[in-house]
Image (cartoon, grey):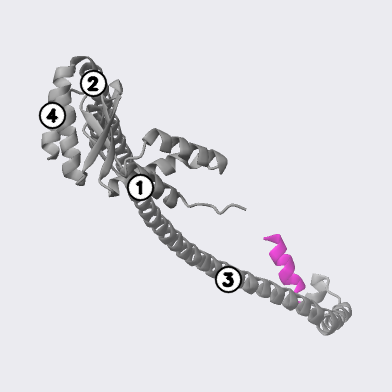
Amino acid sequence: MAIRVSRRKISNYIADQIAEGHETKKLIQELAAFLIDTRRTKELELVVRDIEYELKNRGIVLAWVTSAHDLTSATKTAINKLIKDQTDAKNVELQELVDPTVLGGVKIDLPGQQLDMTIARRLSLLRTNVKE
Amino acid sequence: MQPLTQFATTTNGNVFTSLGIDWQMLILQIVAFLILVFILGKYVYPWLIKSVDERQANIEAANKAASEAQSAAVDAEARVEKLLKIARDEAADIVATAKLESAAALSASEEKAKKRSEQIVADAQGEIQKEVVAAKKALHNETLELVALATEKVVGKAVSSKIDESLITDSLKAVK
């Protein structure tokens, strides 16, 4: 009977491998195979989140940036700098998402943190805060 | 003048004889009369007098009883009058008391009805006020929702890439 490996150990292992510069694609395939083999595919999202945390602890931040339009390189640079200032990260990986429903502005999802500066968010705040 | 002369002539003899009176017969009649008087006095008159006395006594008793009855009737009438007066006084008192009590009860019921009506009016005003406040809130929220929706529609079309970039830059500066 195989010993159940904790999610923390898995995420630590993957984060270490990525930090050491191993090929990410190969690591992802190994992780997927492991989860399928141990029938723990339902934990995929949690494992990914844990890996993001572990990478953040190692100075690597994976940021999901959502905006209504494609971002220019200048904007990306500014966002990159902002994230580095906020998290003291050495390396920032930006993942861009275009979502017209945010109307304008930008939303940055970091591990355990979110910076929502979109117009949709401001309208949502207007609805909730000003309503009687 | 002839009868008088005739009488004077006869008086010279026996008067009783001239009058046609028989002495013996007269004495006998006197004795019989006395016997009759004695018998009547002995047996008839006492019974008769007794009967008359009894009747008189009865009549007097009846008169007395009638007088007493009349007196009693007068007394009774006086008592009845007195009782009637007392009853009238009591009735007047009762009527006066009833009038006072009814007036007090009427006043109390009027006061109660007035308070009740005032309470109903106050409650109704409170309800109306609450409904007005609720309607104002609903109107405010609906207006807000409409404004937000309109803003979404307008902003969705109005914000170009350039404007969006400027907006993002400003936001990032604000965060710093």
Residue kind at label 2, given as amino acid type: Asp
Q: Which residue is mark 3?
A: B72
Q: Nearer the viewer, mark 4 or mark 2?
A: 2
User: For residue B52, what is the image quadrant?
Assistant: bottom right
* Badge number at residue A70: 2
Please give the range of residues in magenta: B1-13
Chain letter for mark 1, please.
A
- Chain containing mark 2: A
Marks 3/4 same chain: yes
- Of residue B126 and residue B157, the one placed in the foreground of this image is B157
| Residue bearing the label numbered 4 | B169
Q: Are marks 4 and 2 on the same chain?
A: no
Mark 4 and mark 2: Cα distance apart in space: 14 Å
Note whether B155 is above or below B10 in the view shown. Answer: above
Question: For residue B68, which quarter of the picture?
Answer: bottom right
- Mark 3: give few (<14), some (14-19) or many (20+) Cα within 10 Å: few
Q: What type is the residue that disc 1 sits on? A: Asp
Q: Which residue is mark 1?
A: A16
Per the image, is B2 magenta? yes
10 Å neighbourhood of mark 2: few (<14), some, or many (≥20)?
some
